[in-house]
Amino acid sequence: MKLEKVMRNVYLTDGMLVTKSRYGSHYGEKVFDGFREWIPWRSKLAAMILKGYTIDFKGEEKVLYLGAASGTTLSHLADIIDEGFIYAVEYAAKPFEKLLELVRERNNIIPLLFDASKPWKYSGIVEKVDFIYQDIAQKNQVDILERNTEFFLKKGGEILIMVKARSIDSTVEPEEVFDNVLKKIKSRFKVMKHGNLEPYHKDHLFVHAKLF
Amino acid sequence: MKYNLWFGIYEDGRVDKSSNLEESFLNAENEEPLPFSISEVGIEVFGGKTGYYASLRKVALAVAERLVERELRKEDRYVVALVKALEEVEEAINMLNEKLEDIRTVKDTEIAADFENKIEELKNLRKKIEREIEEIMTKIAPNLTEIAGAKVAAKLLERAGSMERFVKLPASKIQVIGAEKSLYKAFARMKRGKKAKIPKHGIIFLHPFIRTLPKSKRGKMARFLAAKIAIAAKIDYFRGEVDESLYESLRKRYEELRRK
Ligand SMILES: C[S@@+](CC[C@H](N)C(=O)[O-])C[C@H]1O[C@@H](n2cnc3c(N)ncnc32)[C@H](O)[C@@H]1O
């Protein structure tokens, strides 16, 4: 098996993205020889990485994950941040049930069934973090990101946000939505990279930025 | 400034550690970002990084499991719906009984038998709903059900709307739930400069420990019962363990008041 290292604990083998993992399958992905397949159609983060953009994780970061759903992407992020901790926020109980299976098998995930638009509710739980990952498909998701930044992001900390054009405004062209999102983000952050997630996710934008 | 942390209250550089971490976890709300590092403080309180994160993960998981289960089953909402249905069924039974009497006083007809059958059917339905309420109340609020009885407990829950809201009610409010009408009437009278009695008990008046006491002692018992109900609901909601001492103290107080 030929492995090409892409990022911390992330490899490419025969065009397939995988994370180094001691754990079993969480969402139907293949598992072999201590690796788990990371499916780009299921995970926007995987799509971004496969498109050639990587994040330089050290593995001991504190991460705040907004919109963790059932833990598909979270499971891989937990493989990467294997010496740190991930605070996983999600407000829907149904997917969270599945996420809790992941929490039980790992010890680096703190599950938080909270509304991400009200960060004050978990302000006495979450510490200052190095990284905020947000994938909540909400109209006001940039506001929600900013509120959480205010509460929890360290100076010099980074954000990675996944934006779905349709959930922000379905009446205008995605390009226009993305321009507005970028403008908003640029007022508080230094944007390091942004791009689309085609062909894996249509009309999606990722933005990686750093807090001034 | 005081800050609510998941493991206690932080004030002036000191932490008053919570004796119920799941409860403090759900109360860890602050208007402003914390001006200090919660993990640094916590690591000191828990005697190390490993201990801090292990406890945090454990408490977060326990709370999440509980919230998810409740959210998914929505059993308190089911009880609320059942209580409302029960009241309607009871009203229907009363109404049919009245009509049956009306008819009978005029003429003993076959229709009277039909009424009786209907009433019998509704009584069976009532029994069924009551049993269901009791079963679920015992499961979701064992302490509350034990000290208040399933019926009173369910009615209180119905008025509160949910367990989440119930546990936020102070005992003084629980004491008069269901007596709001007479309470407002009393206030209105007082506003007009008239004398009025403040009602001492609402739904909890149905409790045998109050009903069977002489009138002069009911207020005292109602206050005591309401306080215990508030505690019981909190234990049920936050911990779910059964606390035997609650019923014991209630019974003791009742005996005391009865003898005096
Ligand atoms: C597109 S899904 C996330 C998928 C997930 N990030 C993954 O890749 O595995 C968006 C999730 O955000 C959640 N969400 C939306 N608004 C939220 C809010 N205000 N607070 C918390 N979660 C929210 C939704 O319930 C949904 O599960």
Image (cartoon, helix red, strand yellow):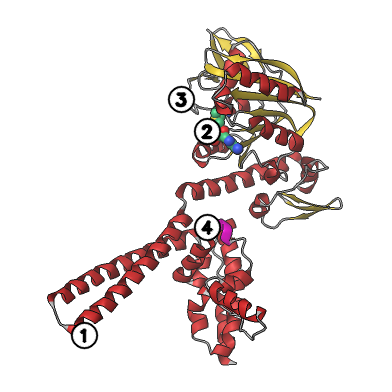
Q: Residue furthest front?
A: B192
Q: Which residue is mark 1?
A: B105
Q: Which quarter holds ligand 1?
A: top right
Q: Which residue is mark 4?
A: B162
Q: Residues within 10 Å of mark 2 (few under 14, many from 20)?
A: many
Q: How many marks?
A: 4
Q: Amino acid at mark 4?
A: Ser
Give x and y (percent) for residue B202: 53, 75
* Residue displayed at 52% across by 45% down: B68
Local SS, label 1: helix
Q: Residue furthest bottom?
A: B260
How far separated are the C-alphas under marks 4 and 2? 26 Å
Residue B22 located left or right of residue B134: right
* Pointer 3 chain: A
Is the CB of mark 2 within 8 Å of ligand 1?
Answer: yes
How far separated are the C-alphas under marks 1 and 3? 73 Å
How far separated are the C-alphas under marks 4 and 1? 45 Å
Q: Which residue is mark 3?
A: A28
Co-location on one chain, circles 1 and 2: no
Co-location on one chain, circles 4 and 3: no
How far separated are the C-alphas under marks 4 and 3? 37 Å
Residue B185 located left or right of residue B136: right
What number is the disc on residue B189? none
Q: Residues within 10 Å of mark 1 (few under 14, many from 20)?
A: few
